[in-house]
Image (cartoon, rainbow, N blue to C red):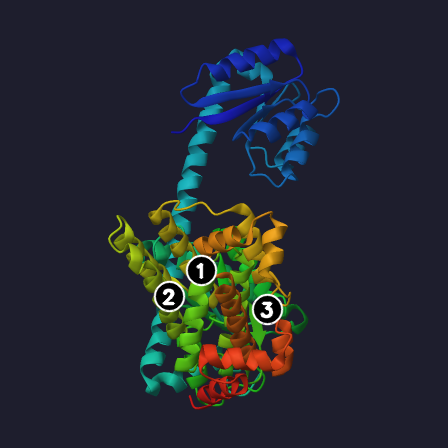
């Protein structure tokens, strides 16, 4: 039997000393956690120690024992077991003590004539507490098993419907019978996944995953019950699928935020979700619900939103990346990663631009992952023999497999690339002044940079500046500036509606004809042809 914490509240010092000695004699059963001489001190002692047992007098100066018990009752903390000690045999006090759910009512004189009466009473109360706790645990275990069985039955019915079209109508009928008007009425569907980047366990640990899925279903059901009728199903890999009515439409708009907050606060796990509104049901076809539940990448380009109308259908359709676009973005991302130590803002700009075009065209998530992996592998080829490189590549592949969103893919590759750089060692330290100039060039390509002006700005001679610049970036100043401007032009041609002369001006070409000439020399196409070829390649997919 575990030691139970006990506090004693008694205003008379001699009596308090005797009763404290009685309790301390049974240190094998009780831990004496303190004493107080009035109800106010007793209340503070209870809030500080949260004991399982309180032994208290009734009549005391200031706050009496009964008022103290009323304060404890309203504190919201777990209720302790209470032993009332008093000189009074007035039944009025006993009635109040019973009303306050006191567990025992002892006369002080009886305790003094029988020195073991108090501890026998406390021991009996602890035995009852243990028995009650065991009963509660058994009841909770039984409820969990029943609940788990219900979850597995619901999951089995849903998965059978997914696998066998012949079972669709019976499953839809079961939803209608439960009060969800999937056939022709308004209802909502929610697809939610545990955010794998926030998990404290591996998705391969099936028993651990099953435990968290059970907890997740409970969180979802509790919140959905406040909206109306609902059904929650757990699927593979930490995914949940819920179908429910929104009888309280005004509150439904904030439901997803409540769910995500509950997962974060109650389970300490992040989650990502999408909610879909069906205004006029699905008819007798469960295909739409099946697509939602089984979609491979529902959150890749958008998450934590409510979609209506045709938006949800569009969110599940993907297109292949045209080869010209693939080659373009591989080159852009490689350059941005290699130069990320010079300009982090450039890397963020490339991420934003790539995401914008990929989301707009709804490119295949698996292709996006392959593109990023190709970038990483091409950058790592120079140190394939370095110790730890093979493990890093395996780790990178594993991270990419688990990525659920575009941004998690980008972050995974950036993280792996930073580790790759550490394997290379520190390398040559860059000149701080040169780094500032290169960063400025990335951030403001419209400025008419001149070699002589830049060299003078840091008190370098032109030859020394040219030498240091090439040593830093691997290209001459003119080659590097031209490449930056052409890469930015290609990006703007494919991702914006700006006119060609506007792009030329934005990247620092004062002469529009000079821009056309240099662009064609570097790419083999005129700016307008480059834009047209990119557009036609996307349209043909």
Does 162 appear above or below 461? Answer: below
Quadrant in which residue 442 is drawn:
bottom right
* Residue in front for this viewpoint, 415 or 50: 415
From the image, tell me which residue sits under label 3: 227
Q: In terms of secondary structure, where does tag 1 sit?
A: helix
What is the x, y in percent for residue 479? 48, 66
> Which of disc 2 and disc 3 is earlier in sequence?
3
Q: In terms of secondary structure, where does tag 3 sit?
A: loop
What is the x, y in percent for residue 73? 63, 38
Q: Which mark is residue 505?
A: none
Residue at (49% x, 69% y) in the render: 483
What is the x, y in percent for residue 460? 57, 48
Instruction: Measure how far apart labels 3 and 2 are at the Cα level.
Output: 47 Å
What is the x, y in percent for residue 327? 40, 75
Rate crowding at label 1 as few (under 14), some (14 to 19) or many (20 or more) other CA atoms within 10 Å.
many
Question: Does the image show residue 298?
Answer: yes
Instruction: Measure how far apart labels 3 and 1 are at the Cα level.
Output: 47 Å
| Quadrant in the picture for the N terminus | top left
From the image, tell me which residue sits under label 1: 337
From the image, tell me which residue sits under label 2: 375
Residue at (63% x, 70% y) in the render: 253
Contact between labelled residues 1 and 2, with CB atoms less than 8 Å apart: yes
> Which of disc 1 and disc 2 is earlier in sequence?
1
């Amino acid at each position: 039997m575990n030691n139970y914490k006990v506090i004693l509240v008694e205003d008379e010092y001699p009596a308090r000393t005797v009763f404290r000695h009685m309790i301390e004699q049974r240190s094998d059963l009780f831990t004496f956690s303190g004493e107080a001489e009035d109800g106010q001190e007793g209340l503070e002692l209870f809030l500080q120690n949260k004991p399982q047992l309180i032994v208290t007098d009734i009549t005391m100066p200031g706050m009496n024992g009964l008022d103290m018990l009323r304060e404890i009752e309203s504190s919201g903390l777990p209720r302790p077991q209470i032993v009332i000690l008093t000189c009074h045999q007035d039944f009025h006090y006993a009635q109040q003590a019973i009303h306050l759910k006191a567990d025992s009512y002892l006369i002080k004189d009886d305790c003094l004539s029988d020195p073991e009466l108090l501890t026998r009473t406390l021991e009996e109360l602890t035995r009852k507490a243990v028995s009650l706790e065991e009963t509660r645990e058994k009841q909770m275990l039984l409820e969990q098993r029943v609940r788990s069985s219900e979850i597995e039955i619901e999951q089995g019915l849903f998965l059978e419907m997914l696998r066998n079209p012949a079972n669709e109508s019976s499953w839809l009928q079961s939803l209608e019978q439960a009060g969800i008007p999937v056939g022709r009425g308004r209802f909502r569907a929610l697809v939610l996944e545990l955010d794998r980047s926030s998990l404290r366990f591996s998705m391969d640990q099936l028993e651990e995953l099953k435990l968290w899925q059970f907890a997740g279903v409970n969180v979802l059901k509790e919140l959905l019950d406040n909206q109306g009728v609902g059904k929650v199903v757990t699927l593979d890999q930490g995914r949940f699928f819920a179908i429910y009515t929104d009888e309280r439409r005004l509150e439904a708009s904030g439901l997803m935020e409540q769910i995500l907050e509950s997962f974060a606060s109650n389970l300490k796990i992040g989650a990502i979700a999408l909610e879909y509104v069906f205004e006029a049901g699905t008819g007798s076809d469960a295909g739409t619900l099946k697509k939602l539940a089984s979609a491979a990448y529902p959150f890749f380009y958008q998450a934590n939103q409510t979609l209506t109308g045709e938006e949800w259908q569009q969110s599940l359709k993907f297109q292949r990346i045209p080869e010209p676009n693939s080659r373009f973005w591989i080159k852009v991302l490689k350059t941005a990663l290699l130069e990320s130590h010079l300009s982090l803002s450039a890397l963020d700009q490339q991420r934003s631009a790539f995401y914008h075009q990929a989301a707009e065209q709804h490119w295949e998530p698996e292709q996006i992952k392959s593109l990023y992996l190709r970038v990483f592998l091409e950058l790592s080829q120079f140190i394939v023999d370095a110790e730890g490189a093979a493990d890093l590549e395996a780790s990178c592949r594993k991270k990419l497999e688990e990525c659920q969103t575009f941004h998690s893919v980008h972050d995974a590759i950036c993280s792996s690339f930073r580790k790759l750089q550490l394997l290379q060692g520190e390398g040559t330290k860059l000149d701080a002044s040169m780094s500032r100039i290169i960063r400025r060039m990335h951030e403001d390509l419209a400025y008419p940079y001149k070699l002589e002006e830049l060299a003078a700005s840091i008190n370098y001679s032109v030859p020394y500046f040219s030498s240091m610049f090439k040593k830093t970036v691997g290209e001459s100043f003119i080659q590097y500036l031209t490449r930056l401007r052409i890469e930015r032009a290609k990006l703007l041609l494919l991702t914006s509606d700006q006119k060609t002369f506007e792009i030329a001006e934005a990247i620092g070409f004062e002469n529009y004809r000079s821009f056309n000439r240099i662009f064609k020399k570097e790419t083999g196409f005129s700016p307008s042809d480059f834009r047209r070829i990119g557009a036609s390649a996307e349209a043909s997919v």
